Amino acid sequence: MAEMNMAKAINKALYEAMERDERVVVLGEDVGKDEGVFRITEGLHAKFGDKRVIDTPLAESAIVGTSIGMALYGLRPVCEIQFSGFDYYNYHQLESHAARFRNRTRGRLTVPMVMRAPYGGGIRALEHHSESREAIYAHTPGLKVVIPSGPRNARALLHAAIQDPDAVVYYEPKALYRAFKEDVPDQIETLPIGQAQIVKKGSNITLISYGASLRNTLEAAEILEEEHDIKAEVIDLLSIAPLDTETIIDSVKKTGRAVVVHEGPRTCGIGAEVVARINEHVLLYLEAPVKRVTGFDVVIPYFSKEKAYLPDADRIVTAALETLEF
Amino acid sequence: MPRKPIDLPYKIEHLSILDEHGDVDKELEPKLSADDLKKMYWFMLLARRTDERMLNLQRQGRIGTFPQTSGHEAICMGSIFAIKSTDWNVPAYRELAGMLYRGWPIETILLYWGGYEEGNRIPDKVNDLPYCVPVASQLLHAAGIGMAMNIKGDKNVVVTYFGDGSSSEGDFHEALNFASVFSAPVIFVCENNQYAISVPISRQMKAETIAQRSIAYGIPGIRVDGNDVLAMYVASAEAVERARAGHGPSLIEGLTYRVTPHTTADDPKKYRSEDEVKEWVNRDCLLRFSKYLVKKGVYSEADLKKVDEEVDAKIKEAVKRFEELAKSEELLDPMAMFDYTYADIPPFLQEQRDELSGLLKKESGSGSEGKKQAETARRHG
């Protein structure tokens, strides 16, 4: 057991995966000698060399497109897109190919690859460096999308993603890279993709979130408990696609109330899907409409104003109280 | 002096070996055995006749819209013949001759254009990717496969295909650059048929050739008479040798002309004259290759007729098999759409699968589900 931050935990997972499976290769911009702009690939190039830790030219479509080719040829590429704000360049390769080869070839060829990218706001970054567009990928049949919320689950989810037989988008909440440390066990762990976790038990209301917003949601749950004597159950989705319907509806059946929290824009966001599933399965258990605390449907403001955009504990507490008082 | 020309390592050549009359440049003629030449001719003719038969099937509504391939046989046959079965082939969608040569059954091709996913099921042991409709995107897969060959230390090569229109896509440039930077053993074969649907090559680029794009990426490039299968073979064999020796990718531009419409849904009368087309019909690749084979004594006129009959018989049988497959319950089962989205079906998708299954059962009433599904699919097809 060792205490480490999320950046180190992701790095550890990459190192372990490369050590145990020589098919695993890492590629992207500045991932080699520079060890990544967030230092996520630290030590990999020194240990595994040029062949398996590949500094690529600057072209996102090609990074993902060649990763697909490598996966088709039997490797397990883990590519890095430097910021999720640039992964629209490669969306086509994910949508038209990574997500489809299994289906198109009726299982003959598959694309077991991982695309990693830091996403989300909260670090006073420049323009095009703070978006949360996980919903785009969740909307793409054939792709899996996972988002960790802490060091331990970051490492376990990345191992699961690398071992997964399908293409996985692994979004890293960059605001959490060095936000806090956690004990990470020595032995390799994996988390099943498609399973959410209840991170705090409660009976009055269900708060559903993931990624960086989970920290704010947990903070809100504490405020609700300490200041209002409300016991909120907090669900960490971890997998955005496939979404774990069961954990969500079991909790809502119990609490009858829910708030879903995320940074991405509201319209057609993950929250919309969560609300739809609650309606489909447990509408009659609801005591109040499900509220969404999300980013607004605007271009994410530059960092002088990003605090007002990102869902914080106060907004979550307010939404929870409104839901409880409905 | 401060201003002087920079010497670039590559010059762009044009290669032509076999002319329209079937006469050959003896010095450049490749040393192919009679059996090899017969094999090339067989698959080129098989592709041509299959394409013609497909047009017929499409007009009868038995298959859907498809891009015609007649006229492209020399480019893909000459290049595919230069690689081994252990090498990889990454097609676009006009490489019928190459796919047939690699082992794709005609009925599989018909299933694809007939609207069945099974048409993309690559035959066992064939190292091909399936058809790729979004143009140029497949070139990156070829580059990635080539990079993976280097990483694994395999001495294999990849050949990949694209059209002149594709050369305007970003993925084309990215693929050439990646393959070049990583010395990936990739042979990029351009089928320059001078039209991207209605847009002529002059609107696609101001450059003289597509081959010269190679200079920008520091790799060898050549323009070849795309109706000359021998020239295509020679240029490809050289590129394959370089790639296998670790010297990286090459770009080969085969210049031909799309004598057919873009697809069966296209009407070229709107954008080009028939005179222009006629001029190119006379330069046909099969016509000149057959003349060459007769002049060389590989085939007599009677032999050619016999080959024609053999090819026709083979297609006839394949169409029959396609028709049988096309009405089989297994291939018409709509439930199959859920089978290969993920390795294992997640619960949320299972729920949707159950939903469709329920709907189909409801529709079928007392009839068996399979039978009804077949009927439903036929109705929608």
Image: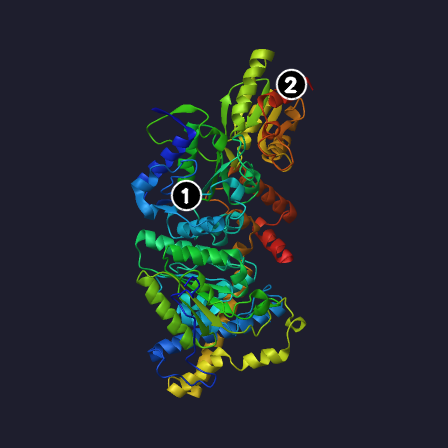
Side of B355 relative to B216 (left or right):
right
Amino acid on which disc 2 is placed? Leu
Mark 1 belongs to chain: A
Numbered disc 1: secondary structure: loop
Q: Position of residue B290 (x, y in %)?
A: 44, 82
Rendered view: B25 above or below B192: below
Determine which residue is flagged by label 2: A321
Q: Quadrant of the N terminus of chain B?
A: bottom left
- Residue A105: assigned label: none
- The residue nearer to you, when weighing B135 against A296, is A296
Q: Position of residue A149 (x, y in %)?
A: 48, 29
Amino acid marked by disc 1: Asp
Q: Nearer the viewer, residue A119 or A288?
A: A119
Q: Is residue B249 visible?
A: yes
Position of the C terminus of chain B by quadrant: bottom right
At a point 36% along the width and 52% down the height, the residue shown is B148
Badge 2 element: helix
Q: Which mark is residue A30?
A: 1
Instruction: Determine crowd level at label 2: few under 14, some 14-19, many 20+ residues with C-alpha closer than 10 A.
Output: some
Q: Are marks 1 and 2 on the same chain?
A: yes
